[in-house]
Amino acid sequence: MIEDSVARLIDESIQLEMNLSDLYFFFKKTFSEDKVIWDKLADEEKKHAAFIESARAFSKDESQFPSQLVSAAIQSVMDTNDALTELMGKYEKEPPSRISAFRLALKMEHSVGEIHFQNAMKHDKGSDIIKMLKELYELDQNHIKRITEYMAAQGIE
């Protein structure tokens, strides 16, 4: 049933944002010289999760969620969650270098942004869910910009 799939997509998407928050919090503890940016990003990812939670109201309108979109999106989000979980396990044993941490953050923001963008472009342009996906995409782009600018200011390539 599409409603169950939509609920699962929402759950997985919330988990993705929380996983990113956990990753950034880990980087905050690991790289004290960068704690301000990591703390802000971690907090904002939690806010993204809350924003996605608000999508549950849209999930009652099954017409806003074409079944092929939901299936593809669930798999993409699950794959990204699995990759993050695996990385966190690895990093708890051996943290990444500072440069690797920033590069990973950029990679993850691009990946999550791409998920939001692709889902938005496959959707009906006027729906509430499309507006939410576009806003999430813009937030992801803002993170990419801020991380890139911070890296440049810190001399991190």
Image: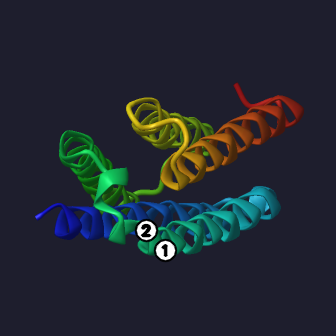
Q: Residue furthest top?
A: 157
Q: Which residue is mark 2?
A: 14
> 6 or 22, which lies in front?
6
Task: Name the image quarter holding residue 50.
Answer: bottom right
Q: Nearer the viewer, residue 135 or 27?
A: 135
Circles 1 and 2 in contact, beta carbons < 8 Å: yes
Q: Residue at x 41, y 37 (%)?
A: 123
Please tell me how crowded label 2 is: few (under 14), some (14-19), or many (20+) other residues with Cα within 10 Å.
Answer: many
Q: Measuring 65% from the left and 48% from the top, which residue is drawn there?
A: 135
Q: Split into 4 quadrants, where in the image is the N terminus?
A: bottom left
The residue under label 1 is 53
Q: Residues within 10 Å of mark 1 (few under 14, many from 20)?
A: some
Instruction: Give x and y (percent) for residue 59.
Output: 36, 67
Q: Is residue 28 left or right of residue 21?
A: right
- Which one is nearer the viewer's eye here, 62 or 79? 62
Looking at this view, is 14 or 132 the one in front? Answer: 132
Q: Which of the image's four quarters has the C terminus? A: top right
Q: Earlier in the sequence, mark 1 or mark 2?
A: 2
Q: Residue at x 26, y 41 (%)?
A: 69
Badge 2 marks a residue whose secondary structure is helix
* Amino acid at dot 2: Ile
Residue extending farthest right: 153
The vertical placement of 69 against 93, above or below, is above
